[in-house]
Amino acid sequence: MGREPQALPLKVLAAEFVTSATSVAGVPSDPGPRIALVGRSNVGKSSLINALAGRAIARTSATPGRTRLANFYRVTLAASAGAGGRRSIVYLVDLPGYGYARGGHGAQFAFAQLAEELFAEKGLAAALLVVDARHPGLDADRRARDWLAGRGLAFGVVATKVDKLSRAERARAIREIAATLEGPALAFSAATGEGRDELWSMIAELGRARAERPARE
């Protein structure tokens, strides 16, 4: 993404877990943009989803690598009164985490095969690259960024857990993440809610990018 997103007044009307998929055959068929969450294991994707939804719809775990499926969450949104109160649906798709070494190098990118199928065949042409602000500049995150960019996918970068850093540490981390991943990073905290509105704005922008993008052959 080339610019910082502008906050939009969106209200979450409903949010729910829909299904877990091991292949494209298990993906929901109803319409609505799908925004994939790509990130290392234990980076806080489930907490991010719960913060966006305003309720606990995704299970969180202290055990890295727990998510081995693509988990689909449906969120119903209402736009501001100025936009006529229009409702919309967006899917947040939590992909298996990468970078967890228990299964060796192959397990570190176990998400790739399933993600490849979903992006290619089910319209997941936009993503949030979720990184931990406490660990900026990781090679695994850079490789994930290259994986997304190499496939021509629209994506934004979200730096989680900024509440755990001092102001100076946070500023340095955001700069390093932006330099490593070649673009701005949105500071986000599931604990405090910081960045929630801006992240919904980023998701809306990614959804528009998907809608305007030509269909893949």
Image (tube, helix red, strand yellow):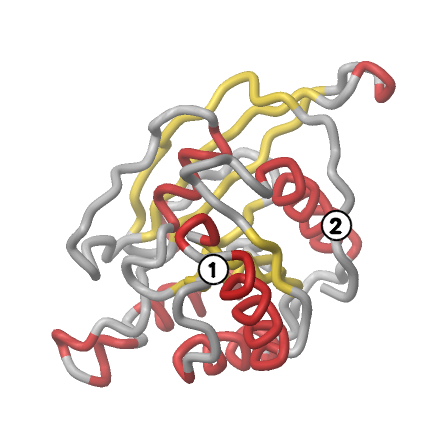
Near mark 1 (Cα within 10 A), the count class, few <14, some 14-19 or many ≥20, is many
Amino acid at the residue labelled 2? Pro
Which residue is drawn at the image coordinates 66% and 67% (left, top)? 216
Quadrant occupied by the N terminus: bottom right
Q: Is residue 198 left or right of residue 36?
A: right
Residue 65 is situated, as x and y percent measured from the top left of the image, at: 21, 61
In terms of sequence position, does the residue under pointer 1 or pointer 2 come before the other?
2
**Image: 69 above or below 51:** below
Residue at point 47% right, 53% down? 162
* Residue 199 placement (x, y as % from top left): 61, 44
Q: Describe residue 19's horizontal placement relative to residue 157 as left or right.
A: left
Q: Residue furthest right?
A: 82
| Structural distance between the alpha carbons of marks 1 and 2 | 16 Å
Q: Nearer the viewer, residue 39 or 31?
A: 39
Give SS at disc 1. strand
Q: How many marks?
A: 2
| Viewer-closest of 21 and 13 | 13
Residue carrying label 2: 5
**Quadrant position of the C terminus in the picture:** bottom right
**Disc sitting over residue 11 in the figure:** none
Residue shown at 47% from the left, 59% from the top? 130
The picture quadrant where one finds residue 7 is top right
Residue 107, above or below 133: below
Amino acid at pointer 1: Val
Element under disc 2: loop
Where residue 149 sits, quadrant-wise, is bottom right
Q: Which residue is mark 1?
A: 130
